[in-house]
Amino acid sequence: MKKRILKLVCLLCSAILLFGVTACGSNTTGNSKSINFWGYGNEVELELTRELVAEFNATNTQGITVNYTPVRTGDYEQKIRNALAGRSVPDVIMAGDGEIKPWIERGGLATLDEFAAASDVIDIDAMYQEGVNRFRYDIDQRRGGEGDLYGILRDLSPTALFYNKKAFAAVGVEILTLSAEEQMEQYGTDAAYFEHNGQKYFSNQIALNWDELLELSQLLTSNEEAPVRNDRSITKYGIYVTNWFGFGWSVGGDCLEWVEDPSLPRGGKYEFTLFDETANYSVKEDQTVTVNGTTYTAGQIIEYTDKDDLTEADKAKCYELPSQLDAMEYFVDLSANWGVSPRPDVTASSSSHGVFTSGQVAMLAAGVNSMGILRSTIYPEDHPAGFDWDVAPWPKAEHGIASGHSGSVAYCIPEKSNKKEAAWAFIEYAAGEPGQAKYAQAGFSYPNTKELAQKLFIQEGAKPANAAIFFEAAEYQRMGDWGYLPSKAWITEWSNDLNTKVLGGEMTLQQLKAERQESTQAIIDGYYDE
């Protein structure tokens, strides 16, 4: 009997050991090197990721096996939240710059500074710092851009102006690929859209100003509801742009501004400034302006917290720029008043790519990650519905700064993972040159370092021909407002009405301000009262 009991106990212990390694998924301490990776994306991205995982599994010499689980984009945030709150977690996850802060605040993600410092593969200092800093967070101050590192930048997706060459030709616009200096020498102007000897020209090397963008968009619009339209246009709309970022940032505006206040627990607070009506200022050529101890040089825009302290003498050294509210009005008017951009009801049943690939719009604000989709979905030029296409810099306000939004994604390791070393080995591969090459050469994303961008991004003969403009855009383009704070509640408070009623012409910006300014500020204040 004792021998039977001993044998039973041994069998039971063996079973516990066996199932203890697997029962909690990846949250285990066994010697298994099988790790779980969750990701999301469109069809192009998912297939690239499957290939990347297969290549890692076939080539790594550490015996690591990655099990990839693709999650539908619309379900991803909720599934990650649920996983991080539970006992079993994936070992590697993807996080967009607008998703990561809530996961950090819940204690769900591991810090990666020590891994990065010891790595011979990942060089954080060589990466685009604007992208890297999106995944840094100071929990105590509840401020991004500083503090611990929670994600390794996978890529950027800078924004450009994609355009339909066939639509331009139909309205008699010739496309130039000349630098500003070369164009000035040949045509006597560095404008992005101009007329010379009766011929209209568009430069794909120079950013349109807002007046030029509107005039060109009207030329490319046949929409019968537009107050200015062109029957010769083969596209219904001249342009489609889905967010205000590039317009507001170009004049130095924003939807949030940090204001120092030593009396507050965190030394300051964010002000909601989406509807700020005060003019902005940029310093003229050969001038300098010093305000509150900060010296601004030619081309720089005076910061929000300094512009109220400009003297009249200071202003004389500056160009007066539109306000943030003016920039918002311009963005809204493209659809609500000028009719050169589709209203929300037009695009509700189609993606932004769809309205461009179908020939409904002549120009599209989109990121690098659109290139692979456009390559695979736009018919060749010899097809009746086909056309050639390219990219140009995103427009900017006259005397404003180059601006625009770039998306970004990082690889992260959940804190509860017990296979962090194996997870890190996969991240080194995915965020290193093999992974960067996989996505960049498919036209899906822009590499995380300048060196790899120069090496991998441009493919001879692949569209768009003018893809080199993304090199400059990657230097200055910024994260969208969804990544500013540890929750998106402050955005949904006003954005739903903006994207439907205001862009649809049913509500003015002043009405939106009256209804949402105070309530949005209250939500923002709440983050810092906790």
Image (cartoon, rainbow, N blue to C red):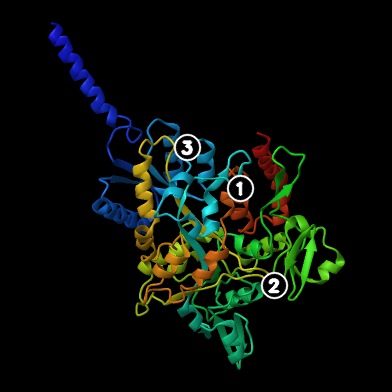
Q: Which residue is mark 2?
A: 399
Residue drawn at point x = 37 percent, y = 78 percent: 381
Looking at the picture, does residue 59 appear above or below residue 32? Answer: below
In the picture as drawn, the residue positioned furthest to the top comes out as: 1
How far apart marks 1 and 2 lie (CA) works out to: 29 Å
Give the numbered dot on residue 112: none
Q: Earlier in the sequence, mark 1 or mark 2?
A: 2
Quadrant for the N terminus, please: top left
Q: Which residue is mark 3?
A: 108
Q: Earlier in the sequence, mark 1 or mark 3?
A: 3
Give SS at disc 2: loop
Horizontal arrangement in the rendering, residue 35 relative to residue 346 (left or right)? left
Residue drawn at point x = 67 percent, y = 44 percent: 520
Q: Which residue is mark 1?
A: 491
- On the image, the x and y values in percent for residue 333 come to 65, 65
Amino acid type of the residue tagged 1 in the rendering:
Ile
How far apart marks 1 and 3 lie (CA) works out to: 23 Å
Residue drawn at point x = 69 percent, y = 65 percent: 251
- Nearest to viewer (mark 2 / mark 3): 3
Residue 473 can be seen, yes or no:
yes
- Nearest to viewer (mark 1 / mark 3): 3
- On the image, the x and y values in percent for residue 96 come to 48, 50
Horizontal arrangement in the rendering, residue 302 relative to residue 414 (left or right)? right
Residue drawn at point x = 40 percent, y = 62 percent: 444
Q: Earlier in the sequence, mark 2 or mark 3?
A: 3
